[in-house]
Image: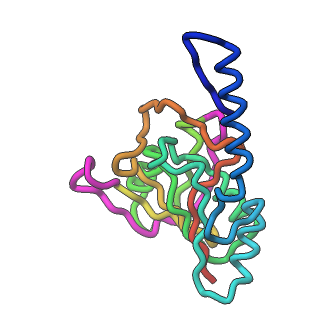
Amino acid sequence: GVLAESDVSLSLARLEARQLAQRIWAARDAFGFDRETAPTLDDAVATALQAPERSVFIADVGDNPTAGVPGDNPYSLARLLALGVPDAVLAGIVDAAAYSACARAGAGQSVTVELGGKLDIEHGAPLRVTGVVEHLHQSPEADAEPSIATLRVAGVRVLAAVAWAGGCEAGRVWAGRGSGGSGRKPSNAWCSR
């Protein structure tokens, strides 16, 4: 939507908003991606799995911490698991509690966590998963880089981070959280065959 304000005339504000909206609509074809797009995550995963390239990057910018949202929506992980993707990296989900559980369990150990869905509860509930902790990185400088656990759940390696540098962390509330519009904001995922 378009919002216009006027201290002088409500009708002038409406006219300007309508004209600006019409110009944006007329130019809508110019606002395109220079990459292949898919209508759903399932379609993107199917395309990736059939691609001749060995590795394919799938991104949905709707749950990107650098765009001001929490980055803790487990939708992509749920879909990758439901589709039985044999080899993928989900990079990543902001979840300090999941990272802590992985750190307590230790590398090589199995752990069950409620992953994601804690910071933005409007757009996704935590996803209960059991996996093996493959790697732990404890950041020496928490302000400069995140502490990250790599948790392998079936064929998916999930990076669970305390926070992304400059991004979101547990207990912090962000203005504009939940943006993305679809209500199903997947995180970034890297799929390889």
Tell which residue pokes out farthest to the bottom in this image.
Answer: 52
Residue 127 is left or right of residue 99, and the answer is: right
Residue 64 is left or right of residue 192, and the answer is: left
Asked whether residue 183 appears in the rendered view, the answer is: no
Asked whether residue 181 appears in the rendered view, the answer is: yes
Image quarter where the N terminus lies is top right
Who is closer to the viewer here, 49 or 130? 49
Which x, y percent locates residue 48?
69, 76
Who is closer to the viewer here, 37 or 185? 37
Which x, y percent locates residue 27?
69, 52
Q: Which residue is depicted at the point 63% across and 44% down?
A: 180
Q: Is residue 110 above or below residue 128?
A: below
**Image coloring type:** rainbow
Where is residue 58, by image quadrant? bottom right
134 within the magenta span: yes
Q: Is residue 175 above or below residue 73?
A: above
Q: Is residue 123 above or below residue 165?
A: above
Q: Is residue 108 above or below residue 24?
A: below
Q: Which residue is depicted at the point 58% across and 10% down?
A: 8
Residue 50 is left or right of residue 110, and the answer is: right
Tell which residue pokes out farthest to the top in this image.
Answer: 8
Which x, y percent locates residue 84?
73, 71
Who is closer to the viewer here, 119 or 84? 119
127 within the magenta span: yes
Q: Which residue is depicted at the point 67% across and 52% down?
A: 75
The stretch of residues the image draws in magenta is 121-146
Which x, y percent locates residue 93?
51, 53
Image quarter where the C terminus lies is bottom right
